[in-house]
Image: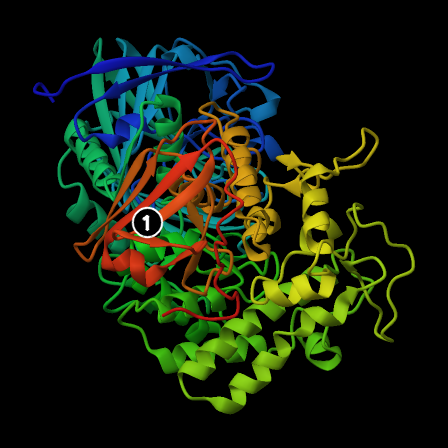
């Protein structure tokens, strides 16, 4: 550190109607963590958390305000002004209020204020002026107590360091009864082993119905006494109850530091002991913090960008950081974990991951992982297959060893098929195909109706989502068909290829939209495409009409190849909602009817490439990059969604994006940076250069791949992984003279 060169760059993050956040970026040679602003997304609809974690780690140790509500789904909301403690698990950027396990809060005699809003828990006010964070680290001054709180993490342990003022009544509160939003404890347990060791567990239900977290806490200083509470009554150790708390008593000298380490396991207390013993054997907080920073820096080095724009560089590396917050580690060092069958299972030869937000992340996050983290992707695929072995189906939206059945589709399928065609190793392809096929033939979630009618019909369910389900199922079926074809399963190939065309069964030529349909084959009578109805999943007909990534050419032919498709696509970006239109909470990041704040729109800007108008894709992609992401707490225009929103930015700023996520093809957009170098795990490097690049020069004039001029609007995954150099020459006027060809959307490139 003492050999590093520090350049303080003051970044003023201005955002509407909120206090300005000043982010000091310390730029150190090769320390890309300096460019990460973990507060991006903590205001507005982003729903991110600013606390400490490592890439894809089990621990997300972050501050909680302790106040429920949509804005505080991640436990933290930037405009708030109190902290009620630091809990060890959080979800990144979702709409689900769950987790918040094992709340720890230091206090002393300086304050005993209680408020109803946080359920009368101890709390302290804080100021953003006395709050800092970086990858793997969070720090804040708890002003009511004069206690400086710092947290960091390893893969399976959370580490707290509290610097106390002099006080004979200093305390550390450990609250297993604490819950927020959807989360509720069902059984908790404390056992005081000795004056520096505490063990226990917290069982809870919420979005995930059966969550189990076992823990061991080690303290650097023995406590002098303790109070153990169950339902507010004093009890003796050990205690098993629902609402249990432990208060540790200390006398502290001025500026005395106490370190608390929490080892976690979803399988056993023994696993939690092993987590601490292996990952944090000592109490040197600074060393552990530095190790977390090194781990993050190593991952961020996988893409080196060159730009003079510090704001954009900060956004880029924050998006890289956020793309690695999920999926999260589920298994212990010995492989044990809580399985989706509610039994203790063991992952041998791979790490078991969970937190698979697949409706979101199959689109860009998982394709990004196949480029940057193929070795880890192997464990992710084996984790999906483990879920299949445990339940008989692939996960829909799984977390903490549970199926939540949130959202739609069987989108583990494109994730598996994409990995298969990209050569990800060490998983059983035959088992994977079996899992994909079985998940597509199940009778749940209206798949039975889908198989019977060739579409999902309207029913009385308040979230029927019939149109969206039909389109999402049809895409997944295309993926299964390609998988079957490559494995020589001709009957399955033909069957699922036919199902992949089911999108045509809900296309209404009169309205030129995908339209809800009754079981008798008639379209719904009342139909206004911009309305948000129960037949579209978090979207409307404008946003879902483009959801045929497996057959873009067929969609173009169906809508109208000459000018109709282009006109409709233009209208998508120009037909803005009226002031009196009722927009749901997820309709954000609006450019016309295009909603960048939600996933179904994410590929739409790239569709101009398929009609020979790549300059329009370049315009739209640059507009989205420039307007929908900011280096500010409200820098996300919608839920970050476990890496999807950030992965869109990473891909698009590099100059390409996977319109069909399982195809192995990336469609060109408009590169944002002068130079980007991908340092691949296979040892190769792939470099993207944008010559004459500027805000005005957003149009591609020519493209050279490995020294050869090309006339195509795409690059394959295989080409990237082989290493090489892609050069875009940019200009301020569209190049309408060259015919840049787009790869057929239905062809797999492996």
Residue drawn at x 21%, y 54% as measured from the top left: 681
Outermost residue to the front: 737
Instruction: Say left or right for 147 vs 722.
Output: right
Along the viewing direction, whichever of 572 and 111 lies nearer the viewer: 572
Decide if residue 539 is in sight here.
no
Along the viewing direction, whichever of 509 and 644 lies nearer the viewer: 509
Along the viewing direction, whichever of 241 and 17 lies nearer the viewer: 17
Image position of 293 with respect to 749: above or below? above
Along the viewing direction, whichever of 389 and 56 lies nearer the viewer: 56
Quadrant of the snapshot with the N terminus: top left
Decide if residue 258 is in sight here.
yes
**Residue 141 position in % (x across, y down):** 36, 14
Quadrant of the snapshot with the C terminus: bottom left
Image position of 84 with respect to 345: above or below? above
The image's colour scheme reads rainbow
Quadrant assignment, res 460: bottom right
Question: Which residue, given by chain and number where applicable, does mark 1 sit on?
Answer: 704
Instruction: Say left or right for 285 vs 508.
Output: left
């Amino acid at each position: 550190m003492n050999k590093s060169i520090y350049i303080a760059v003051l970044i003023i993050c201005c955002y509407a109607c909120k206090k300005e956040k000043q982010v000091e970026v310390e730029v150190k040679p090769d320390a890309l963590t300096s460019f990460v602003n973990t507060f991006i997304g903590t205001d507005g609809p982003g729903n991110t958390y600013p606390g400490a974690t490592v890439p894809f780690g089990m621990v997300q140790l972050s501050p909680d305000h302790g106040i429920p509500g949509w804005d505080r789904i991640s436990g933290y909301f930037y405009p708030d002004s109190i902290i009620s403690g630091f809990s060890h698990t959080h979800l990144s950027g979702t709409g689900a209020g769950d987790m918040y396990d094992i709340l720890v809060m230091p206090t002393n005699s300086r304050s005993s204020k209680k408020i109803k809003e946080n359920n009368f828990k101890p709390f302290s006010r804080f100021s953003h002026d006395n709050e800092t964070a970086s990858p793997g680290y969070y720090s804040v001054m708890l002003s009511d107590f004069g206690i400086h709180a710092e947290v960091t993490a390893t893969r399976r342990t959370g580490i707290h360091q509290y610097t106390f003022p002099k006080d004979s009544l200093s305390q550390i509160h450990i609250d297993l009864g604490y819950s927020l939003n959807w989360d509720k404890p069902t059984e908790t347990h404390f056992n005081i082993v000795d004056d520096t060791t505490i063990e226990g567990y917290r069982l809870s239900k919420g979005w995930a119905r059966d969550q189990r977290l076992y823990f061991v806490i080690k303290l650097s200083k023995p406590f002098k006494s303790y109070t153990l509470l169950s339902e507010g009554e004093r009890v003796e150790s050990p205690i098993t109850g629902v609402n249990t708390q432990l208060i540790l008593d200390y006398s502290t000298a001025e500026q005395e530091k106490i370190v608390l380490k929490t080892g976690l396991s979803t399988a056993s207390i023994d696993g939690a002991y092993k987590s601490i013993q292996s990952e944090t054997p000592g109490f040197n907080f600074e060393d552990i913090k530095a190790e977390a920073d090194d781990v993050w820096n190593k991952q961020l080095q996988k893409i080196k960008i060159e730009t003079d724009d510090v704001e954009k560089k900060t956004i880029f590396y924050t998006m890289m950081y956020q793309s690695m917050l999920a999926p999260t580690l589920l298994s212990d060092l010995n492989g044990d974990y809580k399985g989706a069958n509610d039994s203790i299972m063991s992952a041998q030869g791979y790490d078991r991951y969970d937190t698979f937000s697949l409706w979101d992340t199959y689109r860009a996050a998982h394709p990004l992982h196949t480029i940057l983290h193929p070795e880890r992707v192997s464990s992710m695929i084996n984790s999906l297959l483990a879920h299949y072995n445990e339940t008989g189906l692939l996960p829909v939206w799984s977390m903490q060893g549970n199926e939540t059945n949130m959202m739609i589709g069987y989108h583990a399928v494109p994730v598996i098929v994409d990995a298969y065609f990209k050569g990800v190793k060490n998983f059983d392809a035959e088992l994977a195909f079996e899992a994909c096929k079985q998940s597509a033939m199940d009778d749940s979630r209206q798949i039975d109706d889908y198989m019977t009618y060739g579409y999902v019909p309207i029913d009385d369910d308040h979230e029927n989502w019939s149109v969206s389900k039909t389109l999402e199922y049809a895409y997944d079926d295309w993926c299964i068909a390609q998988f079957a074809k490559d494995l020589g399963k001709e009957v399955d190939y033909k069957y699922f290829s036919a199902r992949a065309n089911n999108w045509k069964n809900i296309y209404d030529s009169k309205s030129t939209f995908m339209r809800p349909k009754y079981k008798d084959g008639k379209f719904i009578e009342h139909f206004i495409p911009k309305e948000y109805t129960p037949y579209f999943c978090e979207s409307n007909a404008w946003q879902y009409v483009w959801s045929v990534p497996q057959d873009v050419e067929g969609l173009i032919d169906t809508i109208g190849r000459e000018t109709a498709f282009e006109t409709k696509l233009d209208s998508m970006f120009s037909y803005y909602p009226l002031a009196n239109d009722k927009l749901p909470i997820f309709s954000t990041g609006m450019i016309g009817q295009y909603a960048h704040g939600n996933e179904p729109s994410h590929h739409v800007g790239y569709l101009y490439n398929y009609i020979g108008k790549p300059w329009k894709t370049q315009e739209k992609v640059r507009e989205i990059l420039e307007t929908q992401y900011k280096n500010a707490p409200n820098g996300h225009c919608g839920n970050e969604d476990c890496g999807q929103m950030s992965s869109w930015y990473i891909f698009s700023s590099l100059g390409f994006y996977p319109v069909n996520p399982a195809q192995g093809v990336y469609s060109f957009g408009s590169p944002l940076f002068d130079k980007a170098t991908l340092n691949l795990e296979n040892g190769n490097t792939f470099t993207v250069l944008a010559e004459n690049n500027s805000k005005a020069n957003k149009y591609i004039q020519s493209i050279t791949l490995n020294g050869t001029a090309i006339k195509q609007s795409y690059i394959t995954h295989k080409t990237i992984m082989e290493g090489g150099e892609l050069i875009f020459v940019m200009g301020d006027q569209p190049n309408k003279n060259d015919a840049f060809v787009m790869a057929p959307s239905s062809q797999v490139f492996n």
